[in-house]
Image (cartoon, grey):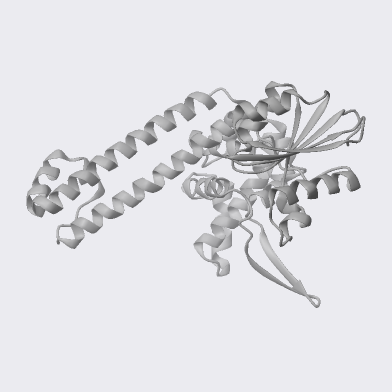
Amino acid sequence: MLEGYRSVLIIDHHKSVSEQLVLNQETGEITRERVRGERAEVRRRLEGLPRPAVVYLEACRSWEWVSDLCDGLGIECRLIDPGKMPEIARSKKKTDRHDVDAMLSRLLAVGKLPESHRATRVERELRELTRNRMDVQRLVRQTLNRLHALCDGQGLPARQRDFTDLEWRGRMSAELGPQLGLVLEVLLDQLAHLRGAIERLEGRLVELTAERADVRALKTIPGIGPILAATMVAEIGDISRFKDSRHLASFSGLVTAVRSSAGKARMGHISKAGPPALRWALTQAIISGLRVRGNPFARYYRRKRPRGRGAMLAVCAAAHKLARVIFVVLSRQVAFDPVKVGRAA
């Protein structure tokens, strides 16, 4: 794994400080340096590496710009998952120096380190848009709940469509009085601002993904529109990193956890191991497609309900099936066909 590189740099990077360890493979010399976590300092260190070089970067909050800097300088960068290293995850000693030493020791002993998927800048930007939209949508629901609570608490129940009616707004402000009327005005202004933000985000998402082949392929699946398709491709990334459809379903966190002991197995809840945004998009696609005529996922959902399962359990089961179908659609770049694609999944 280390053949062909003159130098190996291991970085435990943080916003304020960066712990770095350099192995010169020609001389065998190991140098350690603790530098400020500023762009100029990190760039100076990277530019001084004997080439060809490889950088092992611990996955942290600010790994993205360091990864982009390596790409700009033509240096190979690998993102390391410390959670898969017992030397770090289970150690009672948690310091930056200990972490880089542990990574170097394992690298010299085994020749490789457990890597995480290093998303490209395009993938990360799309993911930021979709996740920010979800956050704003969550604020919209909270604001609507506050509005309903305010009106119900005064014995003046309102419907959601009333919140955009200027005549109702003026009448309600007068009914509530100066203090509660001001609260109503602020909440309605906040709701209008948040809905405008969602429209802007969705417009940009549609603009960025309208010509993408993977998004067009996903939109052929019943229940998946442009926003759900954009969310799915943003969270999945490069489909080739998944071995098969089962790996994608496991990544989504929709597989059932199994607890086995003494020859007895007990099925638990879903693992929820993957990104919540992907899980939300899959389940929302099932719910949105329940009324679509001829939707095979809706039929699968209805088959699960009579067995005594709850609605959400049946939704998760159908979403698991959808995840496996999505793998086939994305890996083959084909339109959804209930017979061919379903059989392949």
Image quadrant in which you'd find residue 231 = top right
Of residue 127 and residue 285, the one placed in the foreground of this image is 127
Of residue 57 and residue 27, the one placed in the foreground of this image is 27
Q: Report if residue 246 is visible in the image.
A: no
- Rendering coords of residue 251 (x, y %): 67, 49
Image quadrant in which you'd find residue 111 = top right
Apparent side of residue 228 relative to residue 2 in the rendered image (left or right): left
- Residue at 85 percent across and 44 percent down: it is 107
- Rendering coords of residue 63 (x, y %): 64, 37
Above/below status of 237 relative to 171: above
Above/below status of 50 relative to 91: above
Q: Report if residue 249 is visible in the image.
A: yes
- Residue at 59 percent across and 53 percent down: it is 318
- Residue at 58 percent across and 49 percent down: it is 297
For the image, the number of numbered tags is 0
Apparent side of residue 87 relative to residue 230 in the rendered image (left or right): right
Of residue 238 and residue 287, the one placed in the foreground of this image is 238
Image quadrant in which you'd find residue 317 = bottom right
Give the quarter of the figure containing the C terminus: top right
- Rendering coords of residue 236 (x, y %): 64, 40
Above/below status of 259 relative to 282: below
Apparent side of residue 188 relative to residue 316 in the rendered image (left or right): left
- Residue at 40 percent across and 42 percent down: it is 136
Give the quarter of the figure containing the N terminus: top right
- Rendering coords of residue 311 (x, y %): 50, 61
Of residue 312 and residue 202, the one placed in the foreground of this image is 202
